[in-house]
């Protein structure tokens, strides 16, 4: 299997609005990211996934793009972005642009033109349909943001499709002129020296709305192969697709090298394990560790060497993992280290979300007035009207709300956590006085240095990149597995709980301790009592090495 740089690197996601503000307006900016590149270089990451910085009216946090080739003014300008690309490159860090090609903003020039008349040259860049026989919507397709996915346009007396907000009209990928315009735009960015693209909801571009098909449409992979050939196919770039509906079989279609589509996909099967089946993300249930083990093992084994996986706990839409599945109280650092070791020892490309490396936590709110996230506020109003208690709704928001990921980065213990000297766009988590980068850097036992060590281990040990995976049969709360490669075996053991757990592996002979999150002496693994959240990786000698 051909080897690529992105298989042994670790990617760091920056949410610019909340990362570092240099002009005192309370909003993070591109110069703020440049200012912190030395910090990211010290962490050891090889690429930055940059959440959208294109010109946008910000209906959906920049995922509604009004000009693909301009920069949102509050973040800076094109010169700032070009400097970020260049300064990052000098430090061995590549910039991965977050790109949305399923839809645009309704303020994009293409759509402004398209809605002028049915005869406009840009009309067919978008998806239009006549009203149904009764004058209503063309069919029953629903928007991800609730309600119909069709919006009536008075001027032309037709409906346009929006699988997200009505201010995010869907592009018509069946139009070859539109596709070429997208490819030209992508090459504009490639020529600026970026390291690749994260492609938002890419599994929707093959939609056939008249047939009610949205995800994984029949032309999807044809479009991606065409995109590959027209843009990044002969470049040394990372491309990762956001694919909510992917199975391992579907993921192979995207990422098998011989298919010439993408480098890898984000799959989200593990993300819904603490949600009640068939309900929304706000309907909570306790995580069953056995289910997490099953899902991770499935993706590790079924993808094999025929595709490539991405590994993540957090992103800009998900709550902080230590608060979600770890222990953000007594065992915050220890559980954070366990979660890091468990994930980074798997096969795939790991992603770190800003603040994850210092153990940032969810920010608890006590009233809906403290919530900025539109999704959370809409859900609050709907559930209040349906008889839910405010306390129950706020509990769901505190567990799953998107603001948890978007609170400003906690750099130090000064006012506003060193994020800004102005008024931040979103309140800083009050625990910044103790949880911050400055404190982490001076503590040799901090979570930061566990992440730094894991990144270095991946760079220097092919077993982490290429090794096979074997899940071990253990107690419910013990997540243990082996990685094997070229006559070497690593054993990874994690206590995923607040309670001591027992593991009995008398046949395993410990040769070397690779990494661990406490001071336990690991000589024998027979009847070993694991402390709460204990995690370790050891090189073992065993007779059946592959």
Image (spheres, rainbow, N blue to C red):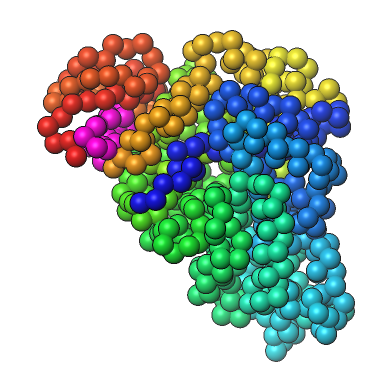
Residue drawn at 28 percent across, 30 percent down: 490
Relative to residue 302, is residue 535 depicted above or below? above
- Note whether residue 390 is visible: no
Q: Inspect the magenta stretch and tell me whether residue 483 lies in it.
A: yes
The x and y percentages for residue 369 are 77, 37
Predominant SS along the magenta part: strand
Residue drawn at 60 percent across, 27 percent down: 41
Position of 360 compared to 297: left or right?
right
Relative to residue 21, is residue 135 depicted above or below? below
The x and y percentages for residue 84 are 72, 37
Q: Give 541 or 108, whichever is nearer the viewer.
A: 541
Q: Give 160 or 224, whichever is nearer the viewer.
A: 224
Q: Inspect the magenta stretch and tell me whether residue 349 lies in it.
A: no
The x and y percentages for residue 233 are 54, 59
Q: Give 128 or 401, whichever is nearer the viewer.
A: 128
The x and y percentages for residue 534 are 36, 21
Quadrant housing residue 179: bottom right
Figure quadrant of the C terminus: top left
Residue drawn at 37 percent across, 44 percent down: 296
Q: Which segment did they paint magenta? A: 469-493
């Amino acid at each position: 299997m051909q080897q690529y740089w992105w298989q042994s690197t670790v990617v760091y996601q920056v949410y610019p609005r909340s990362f570092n503000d240099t002009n005192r307006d309370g909003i993070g900016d591109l110069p703020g990211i440049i200012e912190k590149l030395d910090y990211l270089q010290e962490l050891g990451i090889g690429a930055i996934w940059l959440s959208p910085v294109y010109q946008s009216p910000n209906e959906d946090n920049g995922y509604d793009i009004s000009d693909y080739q301009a920069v949102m003014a509050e973040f800076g300008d094109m010169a700032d972005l070009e400097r970020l690309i260049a300064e990052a490159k000098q430090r061995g860090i590549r910039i991965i642009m977050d790109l949305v090609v399923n839809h645009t903003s309704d303020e994009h020039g293409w759509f402004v033109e398209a809605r002028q008349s049915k005869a406009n040259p840009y009309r067919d860049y978008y998806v239009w349909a006549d009203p149904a026989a009764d004058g209503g919507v063309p069919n029953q397709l629903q928007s991800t943001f609730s309600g119909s996915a069709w919006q009536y346009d008075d001027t032309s007396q037709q409906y346009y499709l929006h699988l997200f907000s009505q201010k995010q009209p869907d592009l018509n990928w069946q139009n070859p002129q539109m596709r070429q315009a997208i490819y030209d735009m992508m090459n504009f960015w490639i020529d600026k020296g970026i390291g690749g693209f994260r492609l938002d909801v890419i599994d929707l571009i093959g939609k056939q709305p008249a047939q009610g098909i949205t995800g994984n449409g029949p032309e999807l992979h044809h479009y991606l192969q065409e995109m590959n050939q027209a843009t990044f196919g002969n470049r040394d770039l990372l491309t990762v697709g956001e694919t909510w509906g992917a199975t391992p079989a579907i993921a192979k279609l995207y990422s098998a090298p011989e298919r010439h589509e993408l480098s890898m996909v984000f799959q989200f099967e593990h993300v819904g394990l603490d949600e009640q089946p068939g309900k929304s993300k706000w309907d909570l249930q306790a995580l069953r560790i056995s289910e997490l083990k099953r899902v991770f093992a499935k993706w590790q084994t079924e993808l094999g060497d025929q595709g490539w996986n991405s590994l993540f706990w957090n992103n800009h839409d998900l709550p902080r993992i230590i608060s979600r599945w770890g222990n953000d109280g007594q065992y915050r650092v220890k559980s954070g280290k366990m979660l890091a070791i468990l994930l980074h020892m798997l096969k795939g490309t790991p992603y770190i979300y800003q603040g994850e490396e210092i153990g940032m936590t969810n920010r608890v709110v006590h009233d809906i007035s403290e919530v900025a996230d539109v999704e959370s506020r809409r859900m609050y109003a709907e559930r209040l009207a349906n008889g839910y208690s405010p306390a129950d709704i706020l509990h769901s928001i505190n567990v799953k709300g998107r603001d948890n990921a978007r609170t400003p980065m906690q750099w130090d213990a000064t006012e506003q956590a060193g994020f800004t000297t102005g008024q931040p766009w979103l309140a800083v988590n009050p625990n910044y006085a103790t949880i911050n980068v400055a404190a982490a850097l001076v503590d040799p036992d901090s979570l930061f240095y566990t992440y730094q060590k894991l990144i270095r281990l991946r760079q220097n040990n092919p077993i982490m990149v290429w090794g096979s995976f074997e899940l071990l049969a253990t107690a419910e709360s013990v997540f243990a597995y082996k990685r094997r490669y070229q006559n070497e075996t690593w054993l990874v053991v994690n206590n995923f709980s607040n309670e001591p757990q027992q593991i009995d592996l008398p046949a395993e002979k410990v040769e070397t301790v690779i990494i661990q999150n406490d001071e336990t002496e690991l000589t024998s693994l027979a009847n070993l009592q694991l402390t709460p959240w204990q995690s370790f990786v050891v090189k073992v000698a065993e007779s059946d090495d592959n």
